[in-house]
Amino acid sequence: MARKPLMLRLAKWHIWLGWLIGVPLLMWTLTGLVMVSRPIEEVRGEHLRAEVTERALPQALALPIVPEGQPRPVEIRLADGDAGPVSIARFADGTTRRYSAQTGAALPALSAGDARAVLESRIVTNSPLVEVRAFGADEPPFDFRREIAVWRGEYEDGTRVYIGRDTGEVLAVRTKFWRVFDFMWGLHIMDLQTREDTSHPILIIFAALGALGSLLGIVLLFRRRKAKIRART
């Protein structure tokens, strides 16, 4: 007799947990379905990036010329600029600068015209470019979320392309579906503000309750099967 009240109590807990975690479980399923509905390469807009033709490097590469007394770069890498190879130098404070790989001279930050030229050569789309706008490192757009000074090229179809003002590189491509994906990701991890925290208490609590509800369901299922077998015999 003691087992029956226990099973009734577990059944009640399972019902209440079902009501409590039903909405999050449905949300996780629907958001997951939306996020996997398209290849991640398409979500990231990789199909809009033009293939970069490899060019031969100059025989003699010059190191970046940094004035005396100024910090030295902690990392230097080569990139293919529209006017030829450039050196991208990263400093200890996280800032980056472009230098000519042929002379070592510092290159100025990209102008709006330079940004348009990069968009024309690096992005393949039939949609017309409607705006090129600058953003400082202290005011990153929400769909970029990186503290880097950028130019944003916006196309008529809603695609946005972010170009580093100090490097000239295409840093991100944000399509309309990327923003849908990003919103669904925020719902999926229950973090619509930063959309980065995947281990906050609310998510952990609901995930634990979901696991507990599933475990109770399995226990109840096996107990009911045993009860049916006994009833038949």
Image (spheres, helix red, strand yellow):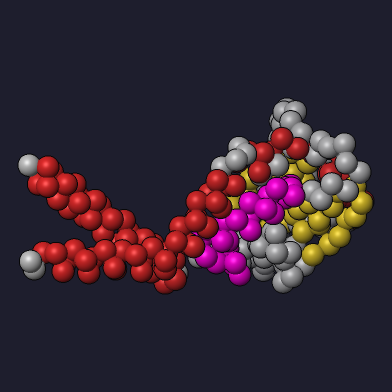
Q: Residue at x 44, y 61 (%)?
A: 22
Q: Position of residue 136 (x, y in %)?
A: 77, 67
* Part of the protein shown in magenta: 170-195
Q: Position of residue 73 (x, y in %)?
A: 62, 57
Q: Could you say which is closer to the camera, residue 69 or residue 12?
A: 12
Q: Position of residue 76 (x, y in %)?
A: 62, 49
Q: Residue at x 62, y 39 (%)?
A: 38
Q: Quadrant of the N terminus?
A: bottom left
Q: Quadrant of residue 83?
A: top right
Question: Is residue 146 highlighted in magenta?
Answer: no
Q: Could you say which is closer to the camera, residue 69 or residue 160?
A: 160
Q: Exactly how many numbered labels are in the figure?
A: 0
Quick check: 90 above or below 225? below
Q: Could you say which is closer to the camera, residue 230 or residue 226?
A: 230
Q: Residue at x 9, y 46 (%)?
A: 230
Quick check: 40 above or below 193? above
Q: Quadrant of the C terminus?
A: top left
